Image (cartoon, coloured by chain):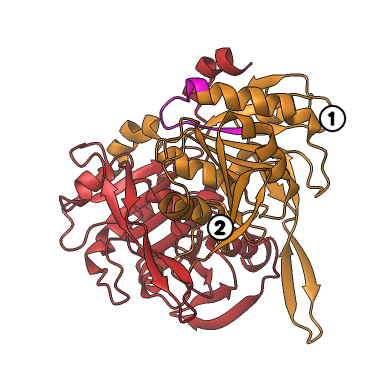
Chain colours: A red, B orange
Amino acid sequence: MANDKPLILITNDDGINARGIFYLADAVKEMGEVYIVAPDEHQSGQSSAMSINKPLRITTHPDYNGIKVYSVNGTPVDCVKLALHTIVPRRPDLLLSGINHGSNAGNNIIYSGTMGAALETCMLGIPSIGYSYLSHSPEADFSNTLPFLKSITSQVIEQGLPQDICLNINFPKGEIKGAKVVRAAKGFWTEEYAEYTDPMGKPFYWLTGRFQNIEPNAPDTDYYWLDRGYASIVPSRPDQSAIDIIEELKTQFE
Amino acid sequence: MANDKPLILITNDDGINARGIFYLADAVKEMGEVYIVAPDEHQSGQSSAMSINKPLRITTHPDYNGIKVYSVNGTPVDCVKLALHTIVPRRPDLLLSGINHGSNAGNNIIYSGTMGAALETCMLGIPSIGYSYLSHSPEADFSNTLPFLKSITSQVIEQGLPQDICLNINFPKGEIKGAKVVRAAKGFWTEEYAEYTDPMGKPFYWLTGRFQNIEPNAPDTDYYWLDRGYASIVPSRPDQSAIDIIEELKTQFE
């Protein structure tokens, strides 16, 4: 049966039980035919990881406000790949990932499962957006993001995105004053592990730490504007080839 | 005790039982003080994933040819982060990842655990190289790569690398005619899942497929030269911000 509405595939890395993905689905459901395909479980920090050494299964859930809902026992990239292979009836016109409960700003995009999914479909030529909100709370109030979710998503449906570019969008908590198109701030993590001793006296370690923005005063970066109450929009490219540096290295290595 | 030799940290994504990592360690062990910290198990396709929801443990293995050897129950990024936090006695001067049993050429770098580790230390300012060999065989014969491993590694120790740049190096099978500094070829995977039915009649899926290079005749790409018997060196940047596109998108989204 023909369907002229854009097909919108929605995934996330917080898993099928997170509120953010349903908030996002409600925000855009009038714009197209929406499918939700999300991980069974929390997949934060899974980057572009995919499952090579295990079988994947698809679970069908009850419809949500008229939207078909599935989950997969894998990563965000697994969800996207398997959705395209098996679940959606035609090639999606748009991929949305999120709303992530927590920041994917700065160079944290590299670890982000939210953005792993968006980069995956971007490489296939599908316009792709990751949305994240700067609160890890499962009960986060996303209501201030609504006008931005609607306007950015509808603009991308109408106008598309430049080739090989997807968007990494982060929203600050509280009032949102506007949006800024910027690059990712550089930083690093400090005090990365909590150390414990198990009942047998053996040590174990658990990832923790604090992100240290090393360029807090750079007005062309995402954290700068997030700190000032603006949404940040970072156009992001899956291809990491440093083309500008190739000539310089030819003399050294060829 | 002072030690003036460069500290070389070596990891991989094939795990502590893979031959490639020991071949690489032997190739460079005269150049510095070498530490091996690799995943307990196979971590191919783990990209920059890190373990957030589980405790990590370090296993100490017997020395290998005078090299200290550890493994971690996590991803390549976990290995690197935990090595820096807990295992190595000072900041490494160089990170090597590999030799990977299998290609990380083209846009497959985005899924590569081998390169996930290299991108991680690159973000910390440590010169970082991922080495991969175009054979998945556990018994792969790496001997043709030896002169390249030695010369490239020693050059990077002596001269460093440009800021925020690491190297994704792939070796062809057979005779290696030389090395080319290039960008990653673009492509996509086809026929991505094998489909099965379990004894209860339920479907499951397993990742498979074939990489389709969409620009096989582009002489500035890695696959072009790998197909012709050359090693490929792709300078790679962790930051995926598409800085060149920011101005264009400001008019659309601000």
Q: Residue, x 62% and y 44% (percent of image)? A: B67
Vertical placement of A64 versus B137: above or below? below
Residue at far top of view: A251
Nearer the observer, A182 or B172: B172
Question: Amino acid type of disc 1?
Answer: Gly
Nearer the observer, A8 or A103: A103
Q: Can residue B213 be seen in this view?
A: no
Q: Based on the displayed image, in which of its 4 quarters is residue A198 positioned?
A: bottom left
Q: Does the magenta stretch include residue A225?
A: no
> Which residue range is magenta in the image?
B158-168
Q: Could you tell me which secondary element the residue under label 1 belongs to?
A: loop
Q: Where is residue B166 in the image (x, y as percent from the top left)?
A: 51, 33
Vertical placement of B100 versus A78: above or below? above
Counting residues from the N terminus, which is met first, the one under dot 2 or under dot 1? 2
**CA gap, disc 2 and disc 1:** 30 Å
Residue at far front of view: B1
Considering the image in quadrants, where does the C terminus of chain B appear? Answer: top left
Residue at far bottom of view: B200
Is A121 on the left or on the right of A225, as rendered? right
Q: Position of residue A74 (x, y in %)?
A: 59, 68
Is B128 on the left or on the right of B219, as rendered? left
Q: Residue, x 34% and y 59% (percent of image)? A: A132
The residue that disc 2 covers is B75
Q: Mark 1 lies on which chain?
A: B
Question: Amino acid type of disc 2?
Answer: Thr
Number of residues whose C-alpha sits closer than 10 Å to that of mark 2, classed few (under 14), some (14–19) or many (20 or more):
many
Q: Residue, x 64% and y 64% (percent of image)? A: A82
Q: Position of residue A232 (x, y in %)?
A: 28, 48
Q: Mark 2 lies on which chain?
A: B
The residue that disc 1 covers is B174
